[in-house]
Image (spheres, rainbow, N blue to C red):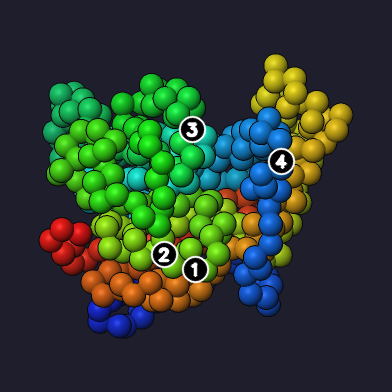
Amino acid sequence: MRAMTTWFFPRLSFPSHSPHFPEPMALPLPIPPLRLFEIDDQSWFPASLRGSVQAVLTHLWSYKAPLLQPASPASLVARSLHQILGDKIKQYTFVDFCSGAGGPTPYIEKEVNKRSVTALKERAQRNGQLHARGIGEALGEGVHFVLTDIHPHLGAWSAASKKSSHLHYLSTSVDAANAPKNIVELANVPHADQKKVFRLFSLAFHHFPDPLAISILRNTLETSDGFAIFELQGRDVGNLFTIACMWPLLFAGSWWWFWGQWEHLFYTYIIPIVPFVVVFDGFVSCLRTRRDGEVMELVKRAGGVEGWRFEMGREVHTWTGGMMQYFMGIREMPRKKGA
């Protein structure tokens, strides 16, 4: 189930091709985004418990609950990128900001490249030109992703990058509001000078207050060729209900997912701090998340909409009411020299 809207600039027209479709329990709350705090963001929250909470969130990006989910959230992100960018997806290197310990990016990279190879095979079969060599070259080239954060997690990133030749990381601190223009070259991405830069914010943008969000968008519009904001929650009843369902889900599945991680299991079943923080922070994330029009207003305040095309939409990730929402900007006019 999918709805999508496109806004084009500089023509300043706002065509919509959003078909009506039923969204489960999509009852928006009549409140603005609330700047509340999340426990996992606090400096006083123990690092070991933060690691357990982040491990849950990372696992849920790649998990597909039987009957309840049409696909994993990481797969939905990859599908959205492919549907919006089409064959041009190979023209970009994707730079993930606020990567934390890696988050969903390794899974998104895997899904994006898997879809790219599948699309190539299908096209070749239709044309009767399926060659193993051509598929091998496509696999070797692939779509590259770069992990960055203001506090680099070098151990986790190094381990993740060893599992894929298309996953890279920048070992130095990166401020999303003042990112270096040559960020892809600094990460030693192959053929970096031949690729465009596409920024990713996966489950991160709702953390930024408006002034910081505007600064990040301004830097993004000045130094990149595209960007995407993905959130797995929103300010509506369905998403809040889905977050509440995570408590029994974690009780049912954690023993299997995290078997052998005894501290994690202790703080899930004996003293249930992990599920409490996941659900509490999930509720807060719902109330902090901006809707499409609110993000668009920040983009306008960042002062750089001319020459960009904007795509936004929602997709069901869980039938209990969980919705993935995305906001993408694609540069339609070349960057100014030196930008």
CA separation in Å, label 3 and label 1: 26 Å
Who comes first in sequence, dot 3 or dot 1? 3
CA separation in Å, label 2 and label 3: 24 Å
Residue 166, percent from left and from top: 31, 31
Per the image, label 2 sits on a secondary structure element best described as helix
Residue 114, percent from left and from top: 35, 34
**Which residue matches tag 4?**
45
> In the image, what residue occupies the spot 79% across and 32% down?
268
> In the image, what residue occupies the spot 36% across and 55% down?
178
Mark 1, residues whose alpha carbon is within 10 Å: few (<14), some, or many (≥20)? few
Q: Is residue 222 above or below residue 46?
A: below
Q: Is residue 223 above or below residue 247?
A: below
Q: Residue furthest top?
A: 260
Residue 2 appears left or right of 13 = right
In the rendered image, the quadrant that contains the C terminus is: bottom left
Nearer the observer, 308 or 186: 186
The residue under label 3 is which amino acid type?
A: His
Q: Say whether marks 2 and 1 touch (CB < 8 Å).
A: yes
**Which residue matches tag 3?**
153
Residue 42, percent from left and from top: 67, 47
> In the image, what residue occupies the spot 26% across and 38% down?
186
**Which residue matches tag 2?**
215
The residue under label 1 is which amino acid type?
A: Pro
Mark 3, residues whose alpha carbon is within 10 Å: few (<14), some, or many (≥20)? many
Q: Which mark is residue 97?
A: none
Per the image, label 1 sits on a secondary structure element best described as helix
> In the image, what residue occupies the spot 31% across and 83% down?
13
Q: Which mark is residue 211?
A: 1
Nearer the observer, 318 or 324: 324
Who comes first in sequence, dot 1 or dot 4? 4
